[in-house]
Amino acid sequence: MYRRMARRHQPVGERVLRNYNFLKKIARTCSAKKRRNYLRNANCDELLAITEISSNILDGGFHITKRQQKKLLPYANLIRKIARIRSEKSARNLYNNQKGGQAFLTAILAPILVEAAHQLISKIAGNGS
């Protein structure tokens, strides 16, 4: 009856792939205090990887499901703010002064990390796609 379309994996940027372990650590952390410390100690490339993810989600460069969109809806203005970041200094200011914690990061990172893991596994397996 219903035919499922083959899911096409979307390419994830090099910056996101380079910082996969850092992003995974942030997404898995339940403690707001630990997440804040990870962001405080992050290097420039790691902070800008989060910005790249936000920008790709807003531009439609990365497909997210309706369910994921609903989870992100309360954080729409914050995601827009993050996507406009272009420097390490402004990223640090935004993440360190964020009111209400960084719980939104889990909602942003979860769908991207799945695709990044698939891409990394493909590279290791030798498919190159």
Image: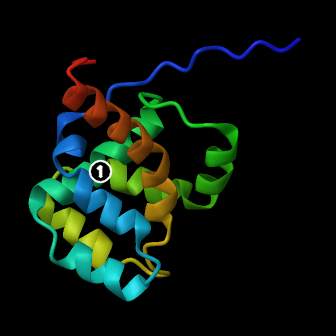
Above or below, 10 relative to 117: above
Q: Residue 32's image quarter?
A: bottom left
Q: Residue at x 29, y 27 (%)?
A: 122
Query: Hey, which residue is sitting farthest bottom in the picture?
Result: 33
Image quadrant in which the N terminus is located: top right
Above or below, 92 relative to 97: above
Q: Residue 75: x percent and y percent?
A: 55, 60
- Visible residue check, residue 12: no
Above or below, 12 relative to 75: above
Residue flagged by tag 1: what amino acid is it? Thr
- Residue 89 as seen in the image, left or right of residue 112: left
- Visible residue check, residue 47: yes
- Residue 115 as seen in the image, left or right of residue 111: left
Q: Residue 86: x percent and y percent?
A: 19, 50
Image colouring = rainbow
Q: Residue at x 20, y 78 (%)?
A: 40
Q: How many marks?
A: 1
Q: Residue 102: x percent and y percent?
A: 43, 73
Q: Residue at x 83, y 15 (%)?
A: 2
Q: Residue 28: x percent and y percent?
A: 42, 67
Query: Hey, which residue is sitting farthest right in the picture?
Result: 1
Q: Is the residue marked by circle 1 packed among few (<14), some (14-19), or many (20+) residues within 10 Å?
A: many
At mark 1, the secondary structure is: helix
- Residue 34 as seen in the image, left or right of residue 3: left
The residue to which callout 1 is attached is: 51
Q: Residue 97's image quarter?
A: bottom left
Q: Is 97 in front, or is 70?
A: 70
Image quadrant in which the C terminus is located: top left
